[in-house]
Every structure is written in C-alpha cells, then in structure tokens.
Image (cartoon, helix red, strand yellow):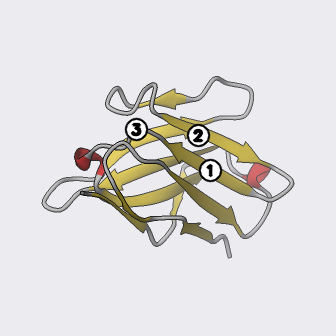
Amino acid sequence: QVQLVESGGGLVQPGGSLRLSCAASGSIFSFRSMGWYRQAPGKEREFVALIIPGDAPTYADSVKGRFTISADSARNTVYLQMNSLKPEDTAVYYCNGMIRTYAYWGQGTQVTVSS
C-alpha cells in the first residue's frame, strides 16, 4: 500500500518561509514523478511544482523563483521549500506521486499566510 504523508504546514507571516515534507512509504524511485499541488477555499486544486528523475523541476508561474522542490532518496522524502510567502499562497498543500498512470495523494497540510 503506497502512502504519502505531508507535514510542515502552519501559520506564517507574509514574507516568511516554510518547508513542507512528503514522506513516501516506499522508495521514491517507485514513482515516475512527484509533485505538489494546492487548493485554496472555493478554488480548484492547482499545480505547484513537479520533480521527475533526470529532468529539471518545473513550477507554476505563480511560485517560480520563490518555491523549490527537491527530493532525498535516502529518506524517501520530497520537500517544498517556500520563501517570500504571500497571502495568496494560503491553501491546503497536497503531495502527489505517479506510478504508471495512477496518482497517489497525501492527506494535505494547511499553509496559512497572514499577518
């Protein structure tokens, strides 16, 4: 049973930073891609960042230059470093992993950017 567990969310002031973690129950090499998505209240879930082994990471335009996705294969964990946070970054952040054409999701972690 594949499981993804996010952590690291919380309340932060505008301009602050947070690092989200996504721990996989097995090797992250099992996934052909891993990424982060987010869903704000009343909005659809949207793409944030993606990492594919051997390729450069990709980012949504809204977070480019502020967020960084990375992977630690020894810990089977994918991270999302979020800097210069804005109120519009407030959302539930979900980790995603693709095995063939099947998408696995974590339970989500809340990020709130507010003064």
Q: Which residue is mark 2?
A: 69
| Residue name at image x 62 percent, y 50 percent | 79
Q: Which residue is mark 1?
A: 79
Q: CA distance from mark 1 to mark 3?
A: 16 Å
Count the labels in the image: 3
Q: Is residue 21 above or below residue 84?
A: below
Q: Which residue is mark 3?
A: 84
Q: Locate residue 112: give its quadrant.
A: bottom left
Q: Position of residue 27 (x, y in %)?
A: 80, 58
Q: Is residue 38 above or below residue 26?
A: above
Mark 3 secondary-structure assignment: loop
Q: Position of residue 42 (x, y in %)?
A: 13, 60
Q: Amino acid at mark 2?
A: Ile
Q: Amino acid at mark 3?
A: Ser
Tell me which numbered mark, 1 or 3, is placed earlier along the sequence.
1
Q: Amino acid at mark 1?
A: Tyr
Q: Position of residue 98 (x, y in %)?
A: 58, 50
Q: CA distance from mark 3 to mark 2?
A: 15 Å
Mark 2 secondary-structure assignment: strand
Q: Is residue 107 above or below residue 13?
A: below
Quarter the C terminus occupies: bottom left
Q: Residue furthest left?
A: 42
Q: Is residue 5 above or below residue 69?
A: below
Q: Locate residue 13: give its quadrant.
A: bottom left
Say whether residue 46 is left or right of residue 37. Answer: left
Q: CA distance from mark 2 to mark 1?
A: 6 Å
Q: Position of residue 59 (x, y in %)?
A: 45, 30
Tell me which numbered mark, 3 or 2, is placed earlier along the sequence.
2
Mark 1 secondary-structure assignment: strand
Q: Name the disc covering residue 100, or none.
A: none
Quarter the N terminus occupies: bottom right
